[in-house]
Image (spheres, rainbow, N blue to C red):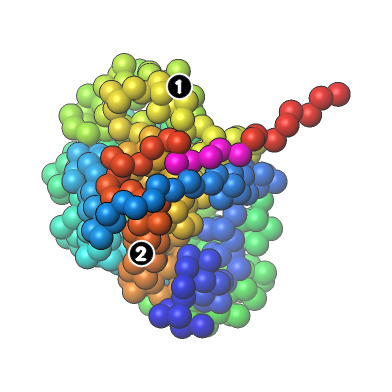
């Protein structure tokens, strides 16, 4: 299968698997513990059903929305993910370029392997910067200032990583960022010479926006997270960050209506329903099952961003119909990047756009405002197990 023959996101995943060594593929593909939440995100989203209106003029679909301080041509955008250069040497800048060309917003992870300034130069489209709360608050202030100066539209504070999740595929594959020499790692990597050639040509992979700190990194990225992220972070710190940023601000990783209202109380402009793609708390519900109560609690006072398990344009439509303002995509574009760099990301975005438009047409919805909750049938949740 060539890139042009990839018909859907699952095909891009297959191409990614062919090009990446197992450890890198599994780093994208995997989740925490038993991967119950990872599987639930996809399965529950898929299990929701769409019911359509007939005889609606759908000659021209308008997918525009506004979120995170920017006008969007399409209601989905790139979610922040760590260390993109691990999957393709072109890394974050290639993703940002492909997104910019497609009129899709980009989000850069704190753990990104490209600088804020390089990413800013790669796209003129809307871009967002994701942060964690580092122990060193000076560092937080500094990166926020840099992101603002470089023209990033909004800040995203990720709150579902009080500690790194337990991703068992990584130690099983002897995987670390940056890759450390070991026999098992060497065998996996040697089986993928194109990827290896790409990797050795590029500079070392590290959190590029914290290069001084990253230079002291000895135990790999998960250890780095556990060492450097502040575990005593509370709403007060989040409020401090909102104040620092002075602009559109999203809180990513919210699960409950109560926490959604708290986001508003501290001045966030967007509540982002996410379980980190099933990579953090295993046993968490699928995000599609968390969405409606959050939408109801927010009552239109803020945007609601949705992510987790989006693999088809129809998944985006379902989340929007349940009240999300926009959807973020993670693995869907990472598989494209891994398969073929910038062209692979472009292919992922085209696939999702075409599927989104076709689903809207088949549903009889011309604009996002035309989407209604009664167009989505939620499946009955798994019956509780009683003793
Ligand atoms: C490889 C990988 C790395 C990620 N790194 C980050 C990160 O650095 N910061 C963050 O807020 N979320 C991170 N995420 C979570 C995504 O932003 C997003 O919430 C998740 O991927 C959505 O689920 P999906 O992959 O099913 O679309 C990462 C996800 C993946 C797959």
Q: In the picture provided, is 244 more to the left or to the right than 41?
A: left
The residue shown at (73%, 31%) is 383
The residue where tag 2 is placed is 354
Q: Is mark 2 within 8 Å of ligand 1?
A: no
Secondary-structure class at tag 1:
helix
Observer-nearest residue: 254 or 60? 60
Q: In the picture provided, is 221 more to the left or to the right than 252?
A: right
Q: CA distance from mark 1 to mark 2?
A: 33 Å
Highlighted magenta segment, given as a residue range: 375-379
Asked which quadrant contains residue 131, the reply is top left
Sort mark 2 into few (<14), some (14-19) or many (20+) by Cα contacts within 10 Å. Answer: few
Secondary-structure class at tag 2:
helix
Q: Which mark is residue 257?
A: 1
Residue 73 visible, this angle: yes
Judge depth for marks 1 and 2 and give the one in front: 2
Asked which quadrant contains residue 325, the reply is top left
The residue shown at (41%, 23%) is 296
Mark nearer the N terminus (1 vs 2): 1
Whether 265 is among the magenta residues is: no
Q: Is 124 rendered above or below residue 129?
A: below
The residue shown at (20%, 39%) is 69
Q: Is 65 rendered above or below residue 1?
A: above
Q: In the picture provided, is 171 more to the left or to the right than 93?
A: right
Q: Position of residue 137 (x, y in %)?
A: 31, 30
Q: Is 185 rendered above or below residue 79?
A: below
């Amino acid at each position: 299968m060539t890139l042009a023959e990839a018909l859907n996101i699952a095909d891009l995943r297959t191409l990614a698997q062919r090009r990446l060594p197992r450890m890198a593929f599994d780093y994208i593909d995997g989740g925490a513990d038993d991967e119950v939440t990872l599987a639930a995100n996809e399965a529950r989203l898929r299990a929701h059903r769409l019911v359509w209106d007939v005889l609606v003029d759908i000659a021209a679909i308008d997918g525009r929305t506004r979120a995170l301080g920017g006008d969007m041509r399409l209601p989905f955008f790139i979610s922040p993910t760590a260390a993109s250069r691990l999957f393709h040497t072109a890394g974050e800048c290639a993703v940002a370029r492909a997104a910019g060309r497609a009129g899709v917003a980009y989000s850069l992870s704190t753990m990104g392997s490209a600088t804020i300034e390089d990413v800013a130069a790669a796209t003129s489209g809307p871009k967002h910067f994701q942060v964690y709360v580092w122990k060193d608050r000076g560092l937080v202030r500094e990166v926020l200032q840099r992101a603002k100066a470089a023209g990033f539209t909004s800040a995203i504070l990720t709150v579902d990583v009080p500690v790194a999740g337990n991703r068992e595929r990584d130690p099983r594959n002897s995987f670390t960022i940056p890759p450390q020499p070991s026999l098992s790692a060497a065998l996996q990597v040697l089986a993928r010479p194109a990827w290896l050639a790409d990797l050795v040509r590029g500079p070392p992979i590290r959190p590029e926006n914290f290069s001084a700190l990253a230079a002291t990194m000895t135990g790999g990225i998960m250890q780095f997270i556990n060492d450097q992220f502040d575990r005593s972070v509370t709403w007060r710190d989040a409020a401090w960050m909102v104040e620092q940023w002075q602009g559109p601000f999203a809180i990513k990783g919210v699960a409950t209506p109560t926490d959604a209202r708290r986001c508003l109380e501290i001045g966030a402009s967007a509540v982002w329903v996410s379980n980190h793609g099933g990579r953090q708390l295993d046993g968490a519900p699928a995000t599609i099952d968390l969405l409606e109560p959050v939408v109801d609690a927010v009552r239109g006072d803020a945007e609601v961003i949705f992510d987790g398990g989006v693999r088809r344009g129809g998944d985006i439509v379902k989340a929007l119909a349940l009240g999300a303002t926009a959807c973020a995509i993670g693995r869907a574009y990472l598989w494209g990047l891994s398969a073929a760099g910038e062209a692979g990301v472009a292919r992922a975005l085209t696939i999702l756009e075409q599927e989104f438009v076709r689903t809207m047409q088949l549903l009889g919805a011309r604009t996002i405002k035309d989407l209604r909750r009664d167009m989505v049938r939620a499946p009955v949740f798994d019956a509780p197990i009683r003793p």
